[in-house]
Image: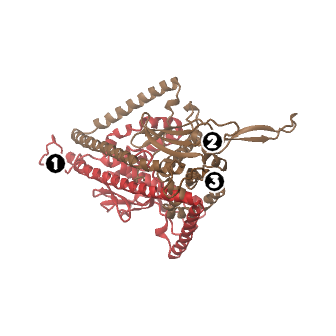
Chain colours: A brown, B red
C-alpha cells in the first residue's frame, strides 16, 4: 500500500494537552523567544547576501511558492483519491460483515426453519477476526491465550479518518460477551499533520470489565513475609500482558521536567509500538482480513522474512516459544 | 508530504544478490520446503472448516479478490498522480538551476560586458546547496567542516524513480573541483516493492579523489612503539566521518551464516540511517531547496521539536556541540 519513501515519523512526544497553566505560560514565552530568534536569524541570513544575490534569491522564493502551491494540490488530489477508494471498498466490507456474522447466508446453503445447536455454533464464520489477527506477526505477539476467548466475540473492525483533531479511529464491535459490558471499543490516534505526520496522542475506550473477568490484570497469591503474624497468603492483583492493553495506550505525563532521558526513550518506544499495532490493524487486517484468515496474506513478504530469520535466528526462536 | 500511516519498513536485510552458488542452492531448497509447508498449512486450515463455513469462506475470498483489484487500481492511479506532479515541478526546478548556477540572470540585474572578479565570485547563488543541506538537522549531522569546501561545488541535486530494479536514484552534479574527478555522483536505492517497500540495497558512485584530497580518509601520525628501533613517527591513513561516505553505503556481506546478531543489528541500523539521509534529500531538500536555504523550511515542525528538546535535553546538548 505505502508509496516508496513515505516515511512516517513518530519522533515527537507532544505533551501540550496535559500541561498545567504555569507550564503553558512558560512554554508560550519560550516558544515566542525561540520563534523571534528564528525570524531574526532568517532575516540576518537574507540581509548578509549581496544585493545581486539577494535579488536572485527573491526570484527563487517566488519559484518555491509556485512549487508549494502545486504540491498542496497534489496532497489534496491524493487525499481525494484515497477517499474515493475507501467508498468503493465500503460495500465489499459490508458484504464481508454480513457473511462473517451470519446476518446473510451465501447461495447454496439452505436455511432450515428450526435451527439446531450445531447450526447456531457454526453461524457465519466463527473466530474470523481472532484468526485473522493471530496470523499476523505483530498482532500475534500481543494476543495472550486468555485474550482469545474474548476476541472470539469480535463482530467487526472498522476504521475512519477524523478531523478536529486530525487523525483516525479504529472501532472494534463485539457481541454480548461474559468479559465486558461495552459493545464497541474505540482506539483514536491524534496526529499533527505537518510535512510528516506526527503522533500526538492515542486514546482508548475504558473497558467496563465484569467482576473477576478483567484480562489486563491477574490475581496473584503471595506468601506472607517470614516472621509475619499473619500466615494467610496475601491476595493481590497485578497488571499483566493482554491485547486489551491496546485500549490503555501510553500517556505523556503531566510534568515534562520530571521525565529523565531513559523514561522518555521508553515512552517513545511504547508509543511507537502502540502506533505499529494500530496501523497494522488499519492498513493490513481491515483491508485484507479474509487473506489473513486463510493464511494467504503471509506469502507476500515471505522471501525477505526468511533471510531476516537467518540473520536473527535466536530472536525468532524466542517468538516461537511465545506463540506456542 | 507523507500520508498518515504510510509507513516505510526497512526491516529486511536481503542478501540474495551476494550469495555464492552453494548458498543459492541451499536457499532455494529451504524456500521450497518452507513454501510447501505454508501451502499445506493453508490447505489444512480450509479443510478443517465445516462444509457450510467453507462455502462462506469461498464467497469471502471472491469479495477479497474484488477488493484487491480495486486496490491495485488505487496504487496505479496514485503513482500516475505523483508522476503528473513531478512533471509539473520539472520546469520550476530548471529555472531554479539556471538562477542558482548563474546560467540565467534575473530581471533587474544588468550584465556588464567585462566581468570583474567580484562578479565572478557572486555568480548565481554561491553555496546554495551546501547551505540548504546544512539547515536540515539530519544532513547537518553528516556534513563535516572538511566536506564544506567540496560541497560548495555542488551545481544541482535531482532524483528520479527507476525500474528494473525498482527504486530511485539521486544525482549530485558538481562543478570542476580540486577534490575529485567525477562531475556526477549517483546514489541508487533498490527497493522490493511489496505491500510495504523494503530496501534491498544501496549503491554509490566510486569517487575518484585527487591525490591527497580524499575526504573520507585522514592521515594520522603515530608514535612508534616503545623499544622499537625506528624512531620516526608512523604515517597511516584512517577512515573518517564525512558526508561523502554516503556514496559508500553499508554492504550486506557475502556469507549470511557468519553474521552474528549484534553485527546484523548494527548493519540494519546503518542501512536505516543511510536510507534516512537519502529520503531526506529526495523528499525535503530537492522539493524545498530554496526554503531550506533561507531557513524558512525549519519552522514547520518547530512546536513539537521544542517539546522533544525538553524531554531529551542532554541529547540535544551533544548535538549542539557537534554543530559548532
Which one is in front, A242 or A44?
A: A242
Residue A138 is at least partly visible in this image: no
Q: Quick one: label 2 or label 3, which is nearer the N terminus?
A: 3
Q: Is the residue under label 3 in contact with that under label 2 (CB below 8 Å)? A: no
Q: How would you rate the neighbour count of disc 1 (Cα within 10 Å): few for under 14, some for 14-19, many for 20 or more?
A: few
Query: How far apart are the alpha carbons under marks 3 and 1?
Result: 95 Å
Q: State which chain disc 1 sits on.
A: B
Q: State which chain disc 3 sits on.
A: A
Q: Disc 3 designates what residue?
A: A118
Q: Judging from the image, what secondary structure is the residue with disc 3 in? A: helix
Quarter assignment of residue B180: bottom left
Residue B279 is at least partly visible in this image: yes
Q: Disc 2 designates what residue?
A: A177
The correct choice, above or below, for A299 with respect to B314 in the image is: below
Q: Disc 1 designates what residue?
A: B115
Q: Judging from the image, what secondary structure is the residue with disc 2 in? A: loop
Q: Position of residue B214 (x, y in %)?
A: 39, 59
Amino acid at each position: 500500500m505505502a508509496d516508496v519513501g513515505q516515511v512516517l515519523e513518530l519522533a515527537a512526544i507532544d505533551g501540550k494537552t496535559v500541561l498545567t497553566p504555569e507550564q503553558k505560560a512558560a512554554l508560550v514565552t519560550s516558544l515566542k523567544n525561540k520563534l523571534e530568534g528564528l525570524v531574526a536569524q532568517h532575516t540576518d541570513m537574507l540581509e548578509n547576501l549581496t544585493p545581486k544575490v539577494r535579488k536572485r534569491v527573491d526570484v527563487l522564493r517566488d519559484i518555491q511558492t509556485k512549487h508549494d502551491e502545486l504540491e498542496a494540490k497534489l496532497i489534496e488530489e491524493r487525499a481525494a483519491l484515497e477517499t474515493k477508494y475507501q467508498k468503493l471498498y465500503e460495500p465489499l466490507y459490508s458484504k464481508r460483515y454480513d457473511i462473517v456474522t451470519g446476518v446473510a447466508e451465501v447461495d447454496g446453503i439452505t436455511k432450515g426453519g428450526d435451527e439446531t445447536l450445531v447450526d447456531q455454533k457454526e453461524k457465519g464464520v466463527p473466530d474470523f477476526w481472532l484468526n485473522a489477527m493471530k496470523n499476523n506477526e505483530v498482532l500475534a505477539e500481543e494476543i495472550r491465550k486468555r485474550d482469545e476467548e474474548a476476541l472470539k466475540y469480535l463482530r467487526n473492525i472498522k476504521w475512519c479518518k477524523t478531523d478536529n483533531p486530525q487523525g483516525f479511529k479504529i472501532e472494534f464491535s463485539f457481541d454480548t460477551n461474559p468479559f465486558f459490558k461495552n459493545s464497541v471499543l474505540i482506539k483514536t490516534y491524534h496526529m499533527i499533520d505537518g510535512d510528516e505526520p506526527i503522533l500526538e496522542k492515542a486514546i482508548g475506550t475504558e473497558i467496563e470489565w465484569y467482576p473477576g473477568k478483567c484480562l489486563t490484570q491477574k490475581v496473584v497469591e503471595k506468601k506472607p513475609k517470614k516472621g509475619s503474624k499473619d500466615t494467610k497468603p496475601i491476595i493481590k492483583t497485578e497488571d499483566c500482558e493482554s491485547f486489551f492493553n491496546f485500549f490503555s495506550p501510553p500517556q505523556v505525563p503531566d510534568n515534562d521536567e520530571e521525565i529523565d532521558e531513559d523514561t522518555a526513550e521508553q515512552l517513545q518506544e511504547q508509543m511507537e509500538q502502540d502506533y505499529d499495532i494500530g496501523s497494522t490493524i488499519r492498513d493490513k487486517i481491515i483491508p485484507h482480513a479474509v487473506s489473513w484468515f486463510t493464511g494467504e496474506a503471509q506469502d507476500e513478504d515471505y522471501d525477505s522474512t526468511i533471510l531476516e530469520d537467518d540473520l536473527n535466528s535466536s530472536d525468532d526462536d524466542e517468538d516461537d516459544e511465545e506463540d506456542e
